[in-house]
Amino acid sequence: MKRWLPSPMLSLMLWGLWLLLANDFSPGQMVLGVFFAWLIPVITEPFWLRRPRIVKPGKLVMFVLMVHRDILVANMAVAKLILSSPSQLRPAFVEVPLDTDNEFVITVLASVVSLTPGTVSADISADRRTLLVHGLDVEDSAALVASIKQRYEAPLKEIFGC
Amino acid sequence: MLSFALNAAFVMVGIAMLLGSWRVLVGPSLTDRVLALDTLYINSIALIVLFGIYLGTSMYFEAALLIALIGFVSTVAVAKYLLRGDIIE
Amino acid sequence: MSVWVEGLVAALILIGAGFTLVGSIGLVRLQDVYTRLHGPTKATTLGVGGIILASLVFFTAQTGVLSVHEVLITLFLFITAPVSAHLLAKTAMHRQEKKVQSTRGEPWQQ
């Protein structure tokens, strides 16, 4: 099982991706998609980082929806900042201590931080313990760190169970 | 209504690309220029998708997808070169 | 195509183009390279997302067949935008680009 279907989630995603790319949901494309969805994970298995299991799929859906909402709401806020008075911005570098050492979770967290406007993840320390985040308009550095940890890191840790 | 929206959008994306080109030319730093180029390729995707809607054909989808792929890879390559002085170490 | 669908497509196109424009205005107006990173990587990505959503609705309504392959571009942009932003931020720190006076905190040495 492990050898012939290394990661069912990846296979499912590849299958969906193939159907989207073909833009054709006919049986023939579905069969071809199944073939690629089986072949690619088997070939690429040695290259992958260690991936955590998704412990709580329901929570993942909620998290994705929340991130989408945040992207929309915060983009409006940033648009307003850009259009009103760029000289009165309060940019800041803040360091966010991380509670997890899983590469995959850190990557997702850094991407989410970058996608929600107002913050860009700029660097990660060599020991994978601190994330450097640049904020566009930060009122209180400690509050920003707390909100990133509580809003994004805590649910991610729960979803991947680490 | 749609044709008005399309024309307005063409103008807006066009202005966005002009502003991006200004940043490419003015700089001041090399990172700024790369960032502006990154923005320009994303803008060009928007322009191509809009053009596809304008002509009513989905033929341009592949072009937009290819620009997305190549644009990302070139941004990463240039950033990596500026960062490490080499692309593949 | 009904008036409602046309209105929806027009609204999505205008919202998308608006965000794209805001991203580029940010690129020109903001003060240093670190703050400039914020405008294009996110506002522009969202703007293109809006335009692509419009294209999806338009072609689905036009042909009557669900046309979802445009979602791929959005998906790809949303995955790659943080990566390029991160690399450009690292590049800026490595080259020790100037930051505005009011910035609190220090960039790391690369």
Image: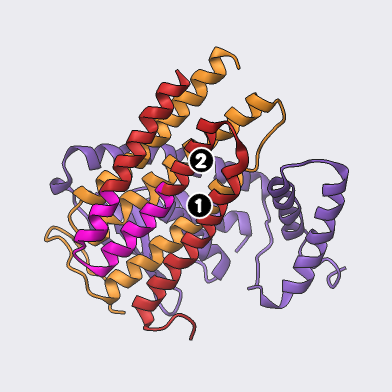
Chain colours: A purple, B red, C orange
Q: Is residue B11 visible?
A: yes
Q: Check chain identity for marks 1 and 2: say if they share one.
A: no
Mark 1: secondary structure: helix
Q: Position of residue C61 (x, y in %)?
A: 64, 24
Chain letter of disc 1?
C
Residue A149's place in the image compared with C48, above or below, is: below
Q: Position of residue B49 (x, y in %)?
A: 51, 40
Pointer 1 residue: C77
Q: Give the numbered dot on residue B68.
A: none
Question: Majority secondary structure of the magenta segment?
Answer: helix
Amino acid carrying label 1: it is: Leu
Looking at the picture, how far across and down is residue B28, in whole percent?
18, 64
Nearer to the camera, C46 or A131: C46
Relative to residue A8, is residue A121 drawn left or right? left
Rendered image quadrant of residue A63:
top right
Task: Classify the position of the N terminus of chain C by image quarter.
Answer: top right
* Magenta-colored span: B19-43
List the single residue furthest toward the front.
B55
Residue type at numbered disc 2:
Val
Measured Cα–Cα span from mark 1 to mark 2? 14 Å
Report the residue that reaches farthest toward the bottom: B89
Determine contact: label 1, label 2, CB under 8 Å: no
Q: Is C40 a magenta residue?
A: no
Q: Which residue is mark 2?
A: B49
Q: Residue at x 54, y 46 (%)?
A: C74
Q: Nearer the viewer, residue A156 or A28?
A: A28
Circle 1 packing at 10 Å, graded few (<14), some (14-19), many (20+), is: many
Residue B62 locus on image (x, y percent): 60, 49
